[in-house]
Image (cartoon, rainbow, N blue to C red):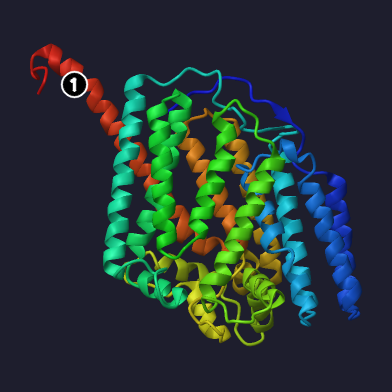
């Protein structure tokens, strides 16, 4: 289903304040200078100043930001899940200046790349996607019905894959016993079933719901709501909560693009914060012994939640300490490991390989940030260059979308790209391209392809009737 947009999109101010970026660069230089003389406390103070400056720069005039911009999504997730890590790590007695330096300069490089892409593209003022589809001609009814049918068929396929997953797993992993052990055991050998369900159900629900909003079809909207509830229930039953949280976030950030009602960023931020707290609590409940031991203090519970939420910082510290002193830089082989997992039966990703080399307490995977991924593959220079290129690519993709015809498939594709880049701040590019981008693009392509076939068949049927080759009612 497509809907052309020739309407003028409201303009907003540039995505960041140059003074904040300049302050962050000065703080980064101060951090390196303090680290060179071994002044740990001043170095951490420079780090905190730099992160605050970048946060203020990227959140400047927040109501005019667009979370569908991959650069904005990445910065938001990075500031929430990566930036506090070095401070928390230092508070636990591990004052590793290199950890603060790689984190701050990675974010600086990303923002510089994004701003450079904006300047090169000549985008002095930014447009956002709020109500981008309003006031535009509606799609033909036949095309809308084809899109609804395709989304429903994709949803049915997702439900069948989910049923096959639970049958193979012997039930839901969250019911009884050690949830984490049961979750990992259920996922072993069932990756295609689980990934198919996680990709098809949310994509189909979003496609159906957004199309219903555009065509004002109450039936489609209600069907999408029921499908969304079903998708969340099945996702949580697998033991993975973050896809459900991500699905809720998708609705929050997509709604302003197709509705006339303004949704303030403060409400969006509040909703995201609530989802973040729920995700933290689930992470702790899933990985800790459940129910918690009798007499556990609130402080110990909070410490456990914070530790597990920012475990990627601990793993990043281990990576910086191990490369290249104990393990040589991989020079891109880490990405080949992730790509190899696309083959049936190949389960040893870069994260699994790295967890074994770092001798982690839980050897199943390393919760690797994008900084750890770049550093393990290419070192300090490669990390800075990689973040610079990623920032430029993220902003260029968004600008390209703004300048092209607005269609629902392209809007969903932008969401997938934005989430892939945003998720990479915590899990790396390779794993998210293989585990999230590829399955979701396949799901979207399936819906688009089915809609095209159904629409074409609907167009050809009247002509066949007119020629007498098909009789009505058959």
Q: Nearer the viewer, residue 443 or 290?
A: 290
**Residue 299 seen in the current view:** yes
Name the secondary structure under disc 1: helix
In this picture, residue 425 sits left or right of residue 218: right
The residue under label 1 is: 461
Rendered view: 65 above or below 111? above
Q: Is residue 460 left or right of residue 276?
A: left
Q: Is residue 151 left or right of residue 81?
A: left
Figure quadrant of residue 140: top left
Residue at 71 percent of width and 63 percent of height: 384
Question: Residue 399: where, in percent of width, then height?
Answer: 63, 37
Residue 303 to residue 142: above or below: below
Measuring from the top left, give residue 175's x and y in whole percent: 39, 69
Nearest to the observer: residue 392 or residue 304? 304
- The residue positioned 69% from the left and 53% from the top of the image is 75
Total marks placed: 1
Image quadrant where one finds the N terminus: top left
The spot of residue 121 in percent (x, y) is 68, 37
Answer above or below: position of 178 versus 142. below
Mark 1 is surrounded, within 10 Å at the Cα level, by few (under 14), some (14 to 19) or many (20 or more) other residues, namely some
């Amino acid at each position: 289903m497509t809907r052309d947009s020739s309407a003028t999109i409201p303009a907003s101010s540039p995505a960041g304040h140059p003074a904040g970026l300049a302050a962050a660069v000065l703080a980064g230089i101060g951090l390196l200078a303090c680290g060179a003389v071994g002044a740990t406390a001043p170095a951490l103070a420079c780090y905190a100043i730099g992160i605050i400056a970048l946060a203020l720069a990227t959140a400047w005039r927040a109501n005019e930001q667009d979370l569908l911009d991959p650069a904005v999504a990445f910065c938001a997730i990075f500031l929430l899940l990566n930036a506090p890590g070095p401070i928390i790590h230092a508070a636990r007695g591990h004052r590793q200046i290199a950890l603060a330096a790689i984190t701050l300069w990675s974010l600086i490089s990303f923002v510089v790349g994004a701003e450079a892409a904006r300047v090169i593209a000549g985008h002095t003022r930014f447009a956002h996607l709020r109500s981008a589809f309003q006031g535009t001609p509606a799609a033909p009814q036949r095309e809308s019905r084809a899109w609804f049918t395709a989304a429903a068929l994709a949803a049915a396929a997702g439900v069948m894959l989910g049923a096959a997953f639970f049958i193979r797993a012997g039930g839901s992993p969250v019911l009884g016993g050690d949830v984490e052990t049961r979750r990992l055991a259920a996922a072993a050998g069932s990756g295609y079933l689980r990934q198919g369900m996680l990709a098809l159900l949310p994509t189909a629900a979003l496609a159906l719901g957004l199309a219903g909003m555009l065509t004002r079809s109450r039936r489609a909207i209600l069907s999408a709501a029921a499908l969304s509830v079903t998708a969340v229930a099945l996702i949580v039953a697998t033991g993975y909560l973050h896809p459900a949280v991500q699905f809720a976030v998708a609705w929050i950030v997509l709604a302003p693009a197709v509705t006339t009602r303004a949704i303030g960023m403060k409400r969006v931020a509040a909703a995201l914060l609530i989802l973040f707290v729920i995700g933290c609590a689930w992470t702790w409940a899933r990985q800790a012994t459940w129910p918690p031991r009798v007499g556990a203090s609130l402080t110990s519970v909070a410490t456990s939640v914070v530790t597990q939420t920012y475990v990627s910082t601990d793993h990043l510290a281990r990576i910086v300490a191990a490369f290249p002193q104990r393990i040589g830089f991989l020079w891109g082989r880490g990405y080949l490991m992730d790509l190899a997992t696309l083959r049936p039966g190949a389960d040893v990703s870069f994260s699994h390989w790295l967890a074994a080399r770092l001798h982690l307490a839980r050897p199943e995977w390393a919760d690797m940030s994008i900084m750890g991924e770049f550093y393990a593959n290419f070192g300090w220079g490669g990390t800075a260059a990689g973040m610079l290129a990623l920032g430029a690519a993220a902003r260029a993709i968004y600008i390209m979308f703004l300048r092209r015809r607005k269609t629902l498939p392209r809007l969903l594709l932008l969401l997938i790209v934005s989430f892939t880049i945003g998720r990479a701040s915590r899990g790396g590019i390779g794993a998210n391209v293989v585990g999230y981008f590829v399955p979701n693009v396949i799901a979207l392509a399936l819906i688009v392809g089915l809609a095209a076939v159904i629409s074409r068949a609907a167009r050809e049927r009247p002509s066949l009737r007119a020629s007498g080759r098909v009789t009505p009612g058959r």
